[in-house]
Image (spheres, coloured by chain):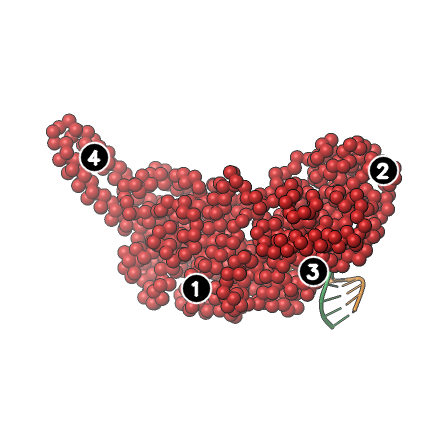
Chain colours: A red, B green, C orange
Amino acid sequence: MDSPTDLFDDSSPQIRTFTPGPSSADLPGVHTAPGFRPPGFPLIHHLLQPGGGPRRILTANQNEVTATQMEQEEGMMEGEDELTEVKRKCNDTVLMAEWSQDVMKVKRMKLECRQKDKQLEDGGKRREGRRREREELKEQLEEARERLQALQEKVWRAFGEKAEKKEKKRNHQRCDGDGDEVMVEDEEDVTGEMFDEEDIDGAEMEKESFSLLSVSHFDNFHKRKDELQKDRERRIERGREGDMEGVMEGSRLWLECGGLTRGDWDGGAEDEHEEGGQKFAQALKLELGSAVARVIDRVLRLYTEMMDHSSPPAAISFHPSDQAHDGGKERDGWMGLLTRGRVEEPMKEKEDGDREQQLKKLVPSGPDLSMPLAVHRSPDTRKTFPLLGPPLPTNINSSHPNLPLHHPSLTRPTPLPHPPLMPPASHPKETSSSTSFHPSSSSSSSSSSSFPAPPPPPPPLPLPLLHYSMQQLFSRSLHHPQLPHLAPSRKDYLNSDPFLEFSSHASFPPLPFLGHLDPSLTRHGVRERERGVRGDGSIRGGGGMDGGELYLTAGGTQEGLSPCHLKKAKLMFFYTRYPSSNTLKTYFPDVKFNRCVTSQMIKWFSNFREFFYIQMERFARQAVRDALTRDGAARMGRENQLRVGRDTELYRILNMHYNKSNVYQVPERFIEVSEVALREFYSAIWTGRDSDPCWKKGIYKIICKLDSPLPDAFRMPGCPVG
DNA sequence: GTGAGTCCTG
DNA sequence: CAGGACTCAC
């Protein structure tokens, strides 16, 4: 380990941590992924680049040396995968020049060999000559291989030694800048976004796959080589723990440019003490856990995407037609339940039926009951209800006179008996059809949708189970008992509890998975780092973790709120817009509530409402504008029945805001409530009530009565997946 | 006084 | 999304 060779040998597997094979033996979850990765390549790269095309080192100084050429050499040098792997990522001009020399040398040898072979073909000593040439070639290849190893050792040393703070900062500057020589990828982007499931594309993947090693680290290689070597030896002699050493060094290579080393990690890194090393190991574990989980997600996503072409998951439904089988519900029956694989689904359906009947008793059912919530308007509505129709809130309230805040109205909301909110349609035959509402839309005679409906959002992925399971597994596998000593800079993000005892992510494990967990694991552990707790100052992006993807929470309660809690709160907003503090405490059992936390969560929902109402008002005003500007009031509005279907822009915006990862099936109830709110705003604006400074309060009152009970799934820690 | 909520700002 | 100011109800 101390010798360069040993270092190199020990370090290589660290680089290829995610490479299937022996080196990944310590990553149990890796093997759960479908094995579509050919061995010998970094897992991440191939995950992100299914096509597996030749990778090109994006440097300007190595015009003739391409990754393709390297791979040609790779084929000639079996067993050197790790070396070429590192080399492929190293863009140092000098090293690459040496490398190119080797390449050219080998190529020359090959060429010569062929020529000689050709000549020998004419002679009778062909076989002997070829044999001899082969032996020579073997020797030369051995030489080249040794040289290659030497170069790799240099590379490794260069990376392994880049630990000093100043050096890091310098590197960071280089990384941040747009280098002329190389495309440098922000490591944070790698860890945080490379698995972003929403806007990832092949090019970015390819870029990111190269970002683990950056050319910038070689800029001063020759100047600092000796110094770095000495520094490294000093550090090695300092006697860090043997098993951690490889991890530390490997992760240094991996995290060098940016990411944790650039962020808070860099802040406390005098990196001359064990503390720093442990911090680094800490951070490395986080990164590895996150990366592996995301890789697995990505793999399965790609896999399922491929499978989707032939057989889309039948359980995933975004269309009303798919809900037809939903137990004897009516056509537009409530979907306030998770639609996939819920154990309690049958019971819920039964309950829904009961609630529906209760509601029917409560509210006189009329012909509207089966109508869509879109404003139903008769052709002569305008005559009956001129511009200033009866105020809607009154009608609404009459519809829900006794609707408690959490009335179990999982059934379809009571149709609004109030008069149409929109001007009457001039074409009676189209009045029965509702039209998707789109703020940027223009008039259309289409009966179904006047606007080109955006493509329906991709169905929620049935993968998070594995995702979070992997986090669990991997986190557990990475558990290191001797890492509680965190630098103050790091402890700022954490509570005093042992940080690494995140054997279970209480905030995140999927509910089905929770059932298989040892209760002891979910009941004790550590609190996650505090994030954004009022009074502590908001700490955003600490550790480079992308919002809500990896939460190092344990089963116990925690004082802080994590991005996961935020995500869960947003999903809860689909059901309840005005949760009481007791409700919050009920549905966040893993949160230790205090005044700050409670008010923060209240504030969250306040912000959610704000966004919700802003969108409603915006779209309502747009609808009013459209109605007024469209050929005069006489013809406005017939196809502009306010509706928040799943194919509308408004729905897309809401879903993007509250369900960004789209892993949750937006309950139909929320859509209905949104439609109610939209129509209320429209009505208020249309009737001019918005001139009243308090004109929104009536709407708020209406909406607050439309809260639904939360599914039991939300009672569990973690984000429900629907 | 405290909690909850809204509005505004950054 | 958070902080601050403000209102309102208890």
Q: Are marks 4 and 2 in contact (CB under 8 Å)?
A: no
Q: Which residue is at the front of the view, A467 or A85?
A: A467
Q: Which residue is mark 3?
A: A579
The answer to whether dots 1 and 3 both sit on one chain is yes
**Dot 3: chain letter:** A
For the residues marked 4 and 2, what is the alpha-carbon distance in whole angstroms? 92 Å
**Dot 4: chain letter:** A
Label whose residue precedes the other's in the sequence (1 or 4): 4
Q: Residue at x 51, y 38 (%)?
A: A310
Mark on residue A113?
A: 4
Name the amino acid, label 3: Pro
* Residue A48 coordinates in the image, percent (x, y): 45, 45
For the residues marked 1 and 3, what is the alpha-carbon distance in whole angstroms? 37 Å
Q: Which residue is mark 1?
A: A479
Q: Residue at x 52, y 40 (%)?
A: A311
Q: Residues within 10 Å of mark 2 (few under 14, many from 20)?
A: many
Say what secondary structure mark 3 lies in.
loop
For the residues marked 1 and 2, what is the alpha-carbon distance in whole angstroms? 69 Å
* Residue A1 coordinates in the image, percent (x, y): 30, 61
Q: Which residue is at the front of the view, A489 or A645?
A: A645
Name the amino acid, label 1: His
Say what secondary structure mark 2 lies in.
helix
Q: Is residue A47 visible?
A: yes
For the residues marked 3 and 4, what is the alpha-carbon distance in whole angstroms? 79 Å
* Residue A541 coordinates in the image, percent (x, y): 54, 57
Single out the residue that lies furthest toward the left.
A124
Q: Which residue is at the front of the view, A540 or A654?
A: A654
Label whose residue precedes the other's in the sequence (1 or 3): 1
Label whose residue precedes the other's in the sequence (3 or 4): 4
Point out the frontmost of discs 1 and 4: 1
